[in-house]
Amino acid sequence: MRHNEYFSQVNNDCLNLCYSLYDRYFKLPTQFFGDGHRDEPGSIYYYLNNYVNDSDWFNVYALIEAIIKFSKFREGVDGFIKDCNLLLEEELCGYRIISGFITPITTPKEIEEIEEALLHPFDTVNKHLNTALELFSDRVTPNYPNSVKEAISAVECVCMIILANKTVTLGKALKKLEDAGISIHGAFKRGLSNIYGWTSSDAGIRHARVDDSEIGSDEAKFMIVLCSAFINFLITKAEKVGIDLMVNYKAIR
């Protein structure tokens, strides 16, 4: 693509993004979109400038998430996310952008595990893990118990794929993985079973019998990172023993 064509495409994408923000984020009447000069009401620049300067910090973060969500210029979005994360790090902010959400997870290894888990081509897994991140990252009304549920459900979906069984639960799957050739150390397996029991017993999180106050940001963060790491672990193990995960995935869809 020639230089002029590239910038023409960038300008078009920026215009489309501004229109989406005007319509779907600011909820402004679109018949006035583009009216006025940069500093006059009706201009998207006017609303962006006033919104950023006058809003609470969490609303500014929400705007950044909206920009990532609505932009169709993916190359530009990747650069935007990288620049935002560098700025968040430089300013010592306790947030980083992960999968389009500004999340209170900042440790590079933890971020790496989550992003690796989201790279696997299994929509059912990614949907649960993304929902876990979204619920955890909400700056106004975070839902930590449901975030934990979604993280566990992502692991459960991986087990369904490995075993080619769309009804198996994680508790039962942990006992059947060895039959599929995936060896897990007994102590490690017991630890995972105990965590699953915490979330899924009659008094557990998934049955909504745990007081919400017992599940805070620390527990939710731990479960998102742990479940992401376990997803990566299981997929690596399954690939090593020759399980065709994509074939299994298509079979149980």
Image (cartoon, rainbow, N blue to C red):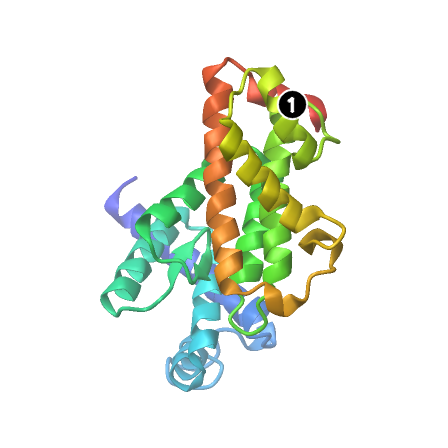
Q: Where does residue 251 sit, x and y in percent of width and height?
A: 69, 21
Q: Where does residue 111 sit, x and y in percent of width and height?
A: 38, 49
Q: Nearer the viewer, residue 36 or 49?
A: 49
Q: Nearer the viewer, residue 51 or 17?
A: 51
Q: Which of the image's four quarters has the C terminus?
A: top right
Residue at the spot of label 1: 176
Q: Where does residue 14 sit, x and y in percent of width and height?
A: 41, 60
Q: Nearer the viewer, residue 15 or 109?
A: 109
Q: Which of the image's four quarters has the N terminus?
A: top left
Q: Residues within 10 Å of mark 1 (few under 14, many from 20)?
A: some
Residue drawn at point x = 51 percent, y = 50 percent:
224
**Regarding mark 1 in the picture, which secondary structure is present there?**
helix
Q: Is residue 7 left or right of residue 161?
A: left
Kindly tell me whether residue 12 is visible in this rendering: no
Kindly tell me whether residue 252 is visible in this rendering: yes
Q: Nearer the viewer, residue 188 or 17?
A: 188
Say above or below: 211 vs 52.
Answer: above
Say above or below: 64 vs 236.
Answer: below
**Amino acid type assigned to the residue bearing label 1 in the image:** Lys
Q: Is residue 37 left or right of residue 250?
A: left
Residue drawn at point x = 27 percent, y = 49 percent:
4
Q: Residue furthest top?
A: 242
Q: Quadrant of residue 165?
A: top right
Q: Is residue 116 left or right of residue 184?
A: left
Residue drawn at point x = 45 percent, y = 82 percent:
56
